[in-house]
Amino acid sequence: MSYNQHKSDERPPLSTITVSGVYTLKMTKPKPEKVKTWEDGVSARLFFVTAEGQCLSKSYGTKYPKPLAMLVGKMSGNYTSEIQPGATAEDFIKYLEKACNKYVDVAVEVTLGDVYNGNQQYKYKLTWAKKGETLKAPDSF
């Protein structure tokens, strides 16, 4: 058996999160070629997955440093200051590293997006528990 066959046999098939609720998500480290540099900063579509293979992706970047710092802080479990202005793609990946590959409970609010190439797209709002509290799905879910 090849390495790739073995790896895919261990991982459940991926499926898009389409229903709002509380999920235990892990953020994967973005590949350097997926990090884009723009006039106003650096950004990437970050990929989140559950142990069962449910997944979502959401864009984050240096243009809006507060949500990025919140993401890294909540996913890593440690306070994180905002990324410095003028950060490079390498700085961005390094900034995200401490938040990667850790499972965290996240409330995910799903809304329908546009249809792209015949496939329904989804928009996601992520909410984390406040320190010392258990995350519960809001009544609106």
Image (cartoon, rainbow, N blue to C red):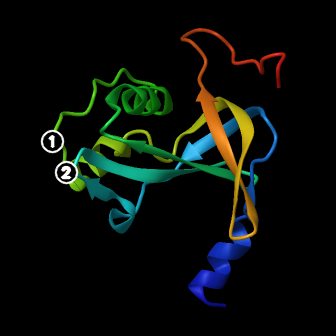
Amino acid beneath label 2: Thr
Q: How many marks?
A: 2
Residue 141: x %, y % from top left: 82, 25
Residue 127 point in image, percent of width and height: 61, 25
Q: CA distance from mark 1 to mark 2?
A: 6 Å
Is 52 rendered above or below residue 64? below
Please identify the quadrant where the N terminus is shown: bottom right
Q: In front: 108, or 97?
A: 108
Indicate left or right for 132 with 11 as reference: left
Residue placed at 65% from the left, 30% from the top?
105
* Residue at numbered disc 1: 86
Query: Residue 11: image x %, image y %?
Result: 70, 65
* Residue 88: mark: 2
Decide if residue 49 is on the left or right side of residue 61.
Answer: right
Residue at the spot x=76%, y=52% of the render?
52
Question: What is the secondary structure assignment of the residue under circle 2?
Answer: loop
Residue 98: name its quadrant: top left
Find out whether the residues at labels 1 and 2 contact each other: C-beta distance under 8 Å: yes
Q: Secondary structure at mark 1?
A: loop
Vertical position of residue 104 compared to residue 88: above or below: above
Q: Nearer the viewer, residue 42 or 106?
A: 42
Residue lying farthest top? 132
The three-letter amino acid code for the residue at tag 1 is Gly
- Identify the residue at horizontal 63%, vertical 41% (top origin): 25
* Label 2 CA crowd tier, 10 Å (few <14, some 14–19, many 20+): some
